[in-house]
Amino acid sequence: MIRDVADMKDIKLKFLACDSLGVRSIATFVETDKKILIDPGAALGPSRYGLPPTPQELNALDNAIDKIKWYAQRSQIITISHYHYDHYIPDECIYKNKTLLIKDPKNNINKSQTKRSAEFLSFLSNECEPKKIDIADSERFKFGKTVLEFSPPMFHGGSDRLGYVLMLAVKYKKEVFVHGSDVQGPQTDDATEWIISQRPDVMVLSGFPTIFLGWKMSKKNFEKSNQNLIRIIKETKIKTLILEHHIVRDLYYKNKIVPVLKEAEQNNVNVVTSAEFMGKKPTFLEARRKELWKEMK
């Protein structure tokens, strides 16, 4: 059974772009008594199976960017978890007159993202000035009746090689939605403990990149990720766990997280993709790239 936004009565969610709908993204629009846009970016994998993006992916990206721009116009608050292009748009004037809550561009950040964040802030000050910019790391903000609580900087994955990211808990009335950007698992105890402390009703999480298992990613970290997901299911009140982004680039990811799925079933927790959460069929365009190119020959 696929649940929908009825999982929360007061917090309304709409996933604007996601890997389960063909682009690299977890861009999310959240509506409480405020309108919040989380991680307004989308991108494509430049190469998969040695192949470039398909026309279907390029079309999905255009549609995703258009949708993000449309919802940005209607948002009051925009948040950015880190400076990878699938999590923010660096050169589009979607931030003007918005309250912008961002990952600290100078601390707990790697060289690549330090450069990108400086370029982004320069663009904002010259062409697209927000109403306000606040550093969000470990901070708690209240807007109306809505609380936005950001995590401390967490590893992008299992180490600091790719820098750090922020997770976000949106709290409104008695409900909690957690946006777990690019913790890739979670692989660390710190990320897991923070998620558990927020007591989410619904969470979207960048899962473990299983396509790299035994190559770029270790079996030990993968087993830790599964254990951490089981802890989250057992130790919180979560109703729906939305696994997205890195994990769904593997068409066979469900076969690799069987213990998690069994625990979820025992605890009446729904495990879905963002597409399924919205009642749509996943397309997984990047994972199907070889197949799609073959069909066009």
Image (spheres, helix red, strand yellow):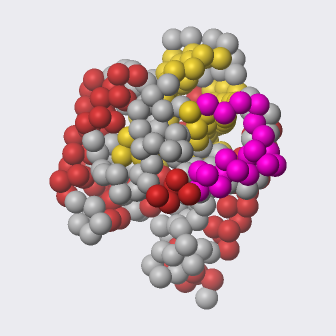
Q: Quadrant of residue 115?
A: bottom right
Left or right placement of residue 10 versus residue 201 in this view = right
Quarter of the figure that contains the C terminus = bottom right
Note whether residue 87 is visible. Answer: yes
Residue 124 within the magenta-colored segment of the rendering: yes
Is 281 displayed left or right of 160 in the figure?
A: right
Residue 146 or 259: which is nearer the viewer?
146
Nearest to the observer: residue 247 or residue 251: 247
Query: Main SS type for the magenta part?
Result: helix
The residue closer to the viewer here, 113 or 34, is 113
Please name the residue shown 60% across and 16% down the image. Answer: 142
Q: Is residue 259 visible?
A: no
Q: Is residue 211 left or right of residue 105?
A: left
Magenta segment includes 168: no
Q: Is residue 151 above or below residue 19?
A: above
Instruction: Give the image location of residue 192, x and y in percent.
Output: 31, 34
Please identify the residue farthest to the left as the structure is shown.
Answer: 220
**Residue for point 34% across, 52% down:** 160
Return the x and y of residue 284 as percentages of the image width and height.
Answer: 52, 61
Residue 265 on image: x %, y %? 31, 34
From the viewer's side, name the closer residue of 257 and 38. Answer: 38
Give residue 151's quadrant in the image.
top left
Image position of 253 (left or right of 35)? left
- Write the residue at 59% across / 74% down: 53
Number of marks in the rendered image: 0
Residue 216: image x %, image y %?
29, 66
The magenta segment is 116-134
Which residue shows up at 55% across the image and 72% down it?
Answer: 46
